[in-house]
Image (cartoon, coloured by chain):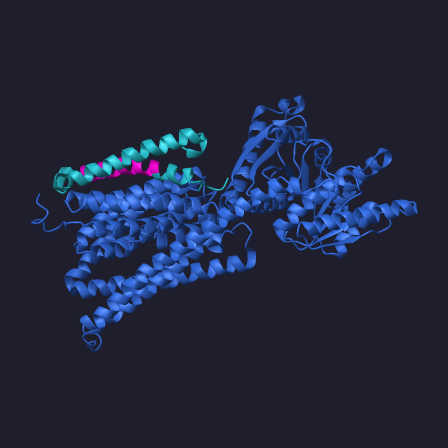
Amino acid sequence: MTDPTSHSGGNMITRVAVYGFISLALYFVLYFFEDSILAYTSQGGWYFIAPVVIAFVFSYFHGSFTSHFWDTLGIKAKK
Amino acid sequence: MDLATATNFIPLNALDVTYLLVVGFIGGLVSGFIGSGGAFVLTPAMMSMGVPGIVAVASNMCHKFPKALVGAIKRAKYGQVDVKLGLVVGASAEAGVLYGAHIQQMIHDSFGDAGSNLYVSLAFVVSLGVIGSYVLWDALKMRRDTGDEPEKVARLARWVQSIHIPGTMVYFKSLNARVSILFTIPLGFATGMLAATIAVGGFIGVPAMHYVLGAPSLMASATELVTAFVMGVGGTLKFSWSGLVDIRLAMIILAGSLFGIQLGAIGTTYVKPHMIKMVMGVIMILVLVSRAIAIPVYLSELELIAPLAPHLPGALRNISFVVLIGALAAGAAIVFASLWSGISASRREAAVATAADVAFAPDTVAAPASPQLSPVGRFERFLLASDGSEYSDGAVREALRMASKCGARVRAVNVVAGGDAELYAMGEQLITKELNAARACLDDVHLLASSAGVAYESEATQGNQVYQEIVGQAEKMQADLIIMGRRGRHGLARLMVGPTTVRVIGHARCNVLVVPRLAKITGRHFVVASDGSRFGDNAAHTAARLAKLYDSPVTVVSVTRPEHSEERRREARQIVNRLISFLKQEGVKVEGTVPHGRPDEMIVKTANEKNADLIIIGSRGRTGLERVLLGNTSERVIDQTQCAVLVVK
C-alpha cells in the first residue's frame, strides 16, 4: 500500500477507483464461484495454502482501497 | 462440494452477509484503535447464524491475520509500530496458543461443553477483572491528573528495564531500552494462552507491553497488531490444514473490518494516550459482565449449584450475548466520538488560523506591516532546538504539548558544535560519538511525540555556530516557531541567558519560545507586553490565538518609564485599551495594566502577581534607542522570570 497523502487529488480518485474495482471484482469472483472455491480451499492438507493466499490477495487490494477511500472522503490522519 | 450436503459450511443469504459486514466493520474499528479486541464477538456471532463452533473459530482466525497486517502497516506509517517487539512477543505467543488450546482440549475431554465454557468464562472474569479494572483506573487517572502530559513509564517497567541478564538482552525502539527476552517470553506466552482461551490475546498483550515493558500505550496497541498477525497466521495454517476455514465467511468479515481498521488507526492520531486505555478498559469490563452473567448457567449444568428455572439459561445466554455486542458497540462509539471531536477540533484550528488575519482589522489594531516568514498566529511548523541536556526538558515537553493542541508538526534538531578545526583535530570519532548521543536524545523525544500523537522528524547535525544552524534550519522549513530551553540560573549562568538562545532570538525571523526547565504552560494566565509598535500588535495577535487554544485569561501590559511624558503615558493607556478591545472581540478574558518603572522588571512583576505561565512580548521596540532597549528587554525578561517567554517577531 502506498501512502495516500503523497498523491494529488485526481491521482487519488483514480487509485480509489482502480483498487475499488479490483476489490469488487475479487468479491464477485468469490460470489460466482462460491462452491468451487469453498470446495478447493477446504480440502485440507497441502491445500492449506489456498485460504492464506486468498486472504493475502484480498487484504492487499481491499486494504489499499479502504485506505484511499477514507482519505478521499477527507478523513485523514492528523499531521 | 454441494453446500446443502456439506456439514461444515452453511448457505449464506443477504441478511447474513450484511450482518457479518457490519459486525466486521465495528470489530475492525476497535482493533485498529486498541490493537485487538474487535474479534471476540465474531465467533459467537457466526455461531448464532448456525456456523459450527470450530469453523467459526477458524474463519475468524483467517480474517484476523490479514486485518492485523493491514492495521499494522497503516499504523507503522504513523511511526507507532515496533516490529521487533511484535515479532518477539508473537513468537512466544504462538507457543502460548498451542498450550492454551491443549488445556482447552483437556478440560473439554474431562468436563464436557459446560466445563469448557465455565473455564473460558472464569478466564474472562479473572483476567479482565484484574487487568480491565487497572487499565480503566489508569485511564481515568491520566485524564484527571495530566491530560496533556506525555505518558510516564510505569515503576514496574523501569524495574524490568533495569534488570540486566547477560546473553538475553535485546534493544527495542519502542522502549528505547534493552530488555531481557526472559521477560518478553512469559508475556507473549500469556498473550497466546489468552488468545486461545477467549480469542483476544491483546487484553494481556497491550497492557503487558505498556505496564511491564514500558512501551507508550499508542505504540503498545500498534505493536500488538504485529503479534496478532503472527498468532493469526499460525492459527490459520493449523485450521486450514484440517480444511476448516470457510473462506467466504472470512473474506466477508474482512470486507467490513478493513474499512473499520483503517478508520480506527486514523483515530489514534487524534486522541490522547489515555483514550486508548479508556476504550480498552470499558470493553474489558463489559465483556467481563457478559461472561459473568453466563456463569450460573454453566455451574448449574455441572451440578455445582441448584438447577436453574427452565427458562433462565436461555435468557441469561441471550442477555450475555447482547452485553457482548454492547461492549463492542460501546468501544466503537467512543472511537467514533474521539475521531469526530478530533477532526472537528483540527478543522476549527485550521479555520481560526485562516480567519485570524481577516479579523485583525487595521482600524482596530495595526496589521503586520510586512509579509513575515512566520505569519502571525500561524502555529503549524515548530522547530524544537534541543541540546539533550536537562535544560531542554521544558522545551521538549511544551513543544509537544503545544504541537498536540495546534496540530503542528515538530522538527527537532540537536546541533553538535563540531564544525571548527579544533574539534576536528580531536578526532572524527569524538564527533561521531557526540552525534550518536544527540540522535539517542532525539529518539527519546520521538517516543514522547508518538505517544502524544504529534507528527515528528528529527536531525542531529553539526555546525560551527549552533545558533546559525538553528536559524538556518528554521528558515529552511519556514518554521512558525522555534522552541528552545534556557541555561541554568545558578552561579555565573544566572547573570545571563545562554548565548545561543540570545543569538537565536536576535537572528531568527520567526517567533521564539524560551522554556525554562521547570516551566509549564497550562493556560493559568498569560501576560502580553506591548509598546504600541507592530511587534507589540503581533504579540497581541499571537496571544489571542494561544489564549483561545489554552483557554487562558490574559493581562495586557504596557510599561512607561518614570521619565516619560504624560502624553506618552496616555498613549500607553490607549495601547492597552486597544489591545483589550481586540482580545475581547476574539472572545478572550482580558484585563490591562500600565505600570511605571523599568519595562523588564514591571513585566516580570506583573507576571508574578498574576501567577502567569507565559509572557508574550514583541521582539523589538519602536524606533531608535527604544528599539534597542526593548530588544534588551525581552532578554532581561527571559533572564528574570521562571515562566516561559514567547518572543514574537
Where residue B248 sits: x, y (%)? 20, 44
Does B564 appear above or below B102?
Answer: above
- Chain represented in blue: B
Residue B400 in sight in this render = no
Q: Residue at x 26, y 42 (%)?
A: B233
**Does the magenta segment cover residue A53?**
yes
Q: Nearer the viewer, residue B191 or B223?
A: B223
Where residue B540 sits: x, y (%)? 72, 45
Quarter holding residue B290 = bottom left
Q: Is residue A49 left or right of residue B223?
A: left
Q: Which residues are magenta?
A: A49-65
Name the quadrant of the C terminus of chain B.
Answer: top right
- Chain represented in cyan: A
**Does the magenta segment cover residue B46?**
no
Quarter holding residue B491 = top right
Q: Is residue B441 left or right of residue B530?
A: left
What is the magenta segment's predominant secondary structure?
helix
Does B293 appear above or below B391?
Answer: below
Name the quadrant of the N terminus of chain B.
Answer: top left
Q: Nearer the viewer, residue B455 or B19?
A: B19
